[in-house]
Amino acid sequence: MISPVHKNLSLTLRIWRQPSTDEQGEFRDYQLQDISPHMSFLEMLDILNEQLIEQGEEAVAFDHDCREGICGTCGLVINGRAHGPDHETTTCQLHMRRFEDGDTIVIEPWRARAFPVLRDLAVDRTAFDRVIQAGGYVSVKTGQAPDGNAIMIPSQDQEESMDAAACIGCGACVAACKNASAMLFTAAKVSHLVNLPQGEPERKKRVLAMINQHDEEGFGACTNTNECEAACPAGISVSHIARLNREYMKAMLTSKE
C-alpha cells in the first residue's frame, strides 16, 4: 500500500492568463493528474505546459532560470502568498509535497504597477535594474588592488552588509506589500554599501538617487506592515529600511546638491 505522504496528486490549477500587457487577463482552470509530490512547483508547471502543447493550446508563460533559488528570476503568487507557503523559499524550491490531493492552487503574477505583466505569469521587473543603475558605482582608484586585510571593517558591519547583499532581487517584497513598495529591495542595495568604506564617497548621492528612482518607477510607500520581510526568500530584515530612512534624511539635510 502506498503511503499517503507519497501518493501522487490530482490538482486543479487556477492560473492567470493574459496575452500581453495591453490586453485583459482572466483566470482559467486546468486539471492535472498523477503529479508526484517529489516534483518542484516549476516542474509541475512544465508538465502542464507539455499537456497544453499536445492539445494545441498556448503554454503558460512564467519566469525561470537557475531553479536553485539563486537568481531571483522565478516569482509567482501562490494561493495569495509570494513564492508560496514555505518560509525563505523561492518558487523554484517549492515542492508539491506541500499540497494535498484534490487541492485547488491559485497562481498569479506579481501585482504591481511598476511590474507590468508581459504575458500570463511573466512580469517586467526592469524597474529594479533602473533603481540599481540610479545608485551608480563606487569610486575606483587606479593601481594595484590593496590587500583585503588592510581594510579594517568591524565584524558586525561586515555581517550586516553581507546580509543585505544577499538580496536576489526577485520582487517578492513588492508582491507581498499592500502598497507595492520596493523599500526592502532599495534598502538592501543601499545598506550593503553604507556599512563598507568602499561605499562612503557616493553615500549621500546614492541614497537620494535610488529613492527618487524608486518613486519615479511607481512603487508605493512603506507603511511598516513587515510583509516584505515575511515574503523575502533571503530573509532580508526590515531593519535595513530603518537604516535607509536614516541615510535618506541625513542626505537630504546635509547634501549640497
Image (cartoon, rainbow, N blue to C red):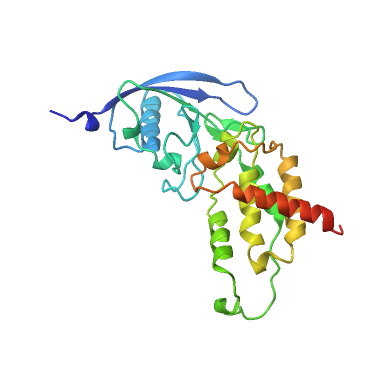
Coordinates of residue 152 in the picture (x, y in percent): 60, 75
Q: Outermost residue, left direction? A: 1
Coordinates of residue 45 in the picture (x, y in percent): 40, 32
Q: Visible in this render: residue 61?
A: no
Query: Position of 247 compared to 174: left or right?
Result: right
Q: How many marks?
A: 0
- Image: 113 above or below 245: above
Q: Quadrant of the N terminus?
A: top left
Residue at 32% in and 20% down: 102
Query: Position of 129 compared to 75: left or right?
Result: right
Image quadrant where residue 172 sits: top right
Query: Position of 97 compared to 131: left or right?
Result: left
Image quadrant where residue 4 sits: top left
- Image: 138 above or below 230: below
- Image: 65 above or below 51: below
Residue at 70% in and 37% down: 221
Image quadrant where residue 51 sits: top left
Coordinates of residue 72 in the picture (x, y in percent): 51, 46
Residue at 70% in and 75% down: 141
